[in-house]
Image: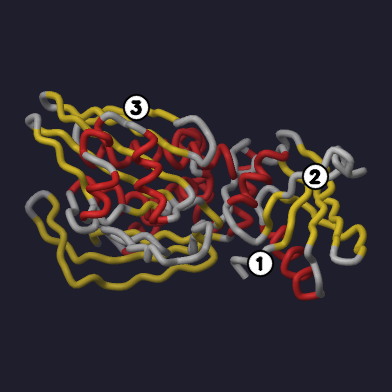
Amino acid sequence: MKIRLLMVIFLVSLAQTSFAVTISNLYRAEIILPLVDSEKKLINKAFKQAIKEVLIKVSGNLDGVNNILPGAQKNAASWVAQHSITDEDNLMELDGEFFPVKKVVVDFYAQSINDYLFSNQLAVWGSNRPSLLLWIVEQDDFVRQVSGAQSPSDLLNLVAKDAALKGLPIYAPLQDELDKQAVTVADLWGLFEVPVIEASRRYQTDVAGVLKVNKILDEYEANLMVLMPNEEPINLFVQGLDKEDIAEQVNAALAKLFSSRYAVVRGQGSAKITLRIDNVIDFQRLDNIQTYLAKIAVVREVYLNTIKADQVHFSVVLDGDLNKLNNAIALDSLLEPVVLDVLDPEVNRVQAYRYSGVND
């Protein structure tokens, strides 16, 4: 997984145009628990915690998962593909007593998880997810601080740690001199999108965002601005008793936002479209495209229709609408959209793309 407790530093010289991240181990959870009772009880407790973590990570919908969690926890043991238990070196204190600590790694059957989510009208979010560069600015006692790889903060660490649990590829800026010249503390505090967008270009993530956190008496208020390419800013607001609460709520809001754009809900409408893809000059490219389309979560079925010169037509059955397909394709650089001329006979019949192969 590409998330780090602080951040992964992007090289500015990278030439790729998209940094969507493939999240591994979506159906795995690692649970740390004290061995208070028998190992059997520990395993059952671990399964219940693990199923919640996995359902949230796969669906991106914390509220929805909480509504269906009792049924999932009742069936969790039957959905386990494999599990392992290892000893941790440290001890955990509970009520003045110290207990040995165990790590339980649980892998669930993907089909069981997906079927349960679909049966409850919740989405399944695929492993290819948008990367987000998050600028964090905090105010405490009227002093403002910006977090980054060169100036980490407790809040940044909490956001990164919780993002890993939710399958969110969140990165922090370096906060070096170039960043400080490109976007000021006042720009970030004011949620001014233009300087944030310009300062974020060097990192080449799919999405940029600003998290503005203010401590008022004993509570925290957070404004989150999400900047999708070529769209109006999306603004969200959360409150919490501490920074950990803020980090968890912010990540839950981000996961729900991205899930609504990229995840699939079976039985809530479908569409059949024709994709025309140009610049397909050999079988290898054809195979790459068909394999790629089949892996997109919103694509239920894909069929090869016709091949003519370097132009290929596919019939694609979608779970959901065309916007979700376009959103998913935009996360990579394998296919580039093509605007057809009004005189092109297929202008109203196909969705046109061109094979670029940048992410091959």
Residue 196, given in percent of the width and then of the height, sits at 35, 41
Is 155 placed left or right of 26 in the picture? Answer: left
Residue 81, given in percent of the width and then of the height, sits at 54, 65
Mark 3 crowd level (few <14, some 14–19, many ≥20, 10 Å Cα)? some
Mark 2 crowd level (few <14, some 14–19, many ≥20, 10 Å Cα)? some
Q: Earlier in the sequence, mark 1 or mark 2?
A: 2
Instruction: Name the residue nearer the viewer: 211 or 254.
Output: 211
Mark 1 crowd level (few <14, some 14–19, many ≥20, 10 Å Cα)? some
Q: Earlier in the sequence, mark 3 or mark 1?
A: 3
Instruction: Name the residue nearer the viewer: 342 or 53.
Output: 342
Q: Amino acid at mark 3?
A: Phe
Q: Earlier in the sequence, mark 2 or mark 3?
A: 3
Q: In this figure, which residue is indicated by the disc labeled 1? A: 357
Query: Can residue 73 be seen here?
Result: no
CA separation in Å, label 3 and label 1 = 39 Å
Q: Amino acid at mark 1?
A: Gly
Q: In this figure, which residue is indicated by the disc labeled 2? A: 340
The residue mark sitting in front, 3 or 1, is 1
CA separation in Å, label 1 and label 2 = 20 Å
What residue appears at the point 29 percent right and 47 percent down from the top-left corner? Answer: 159
Q: Quadrant of residue 324?
A: top right
Query: Can residue 332 be seen here?
Result: yes
The residue mark sitting in front, 2 or 3, is 2
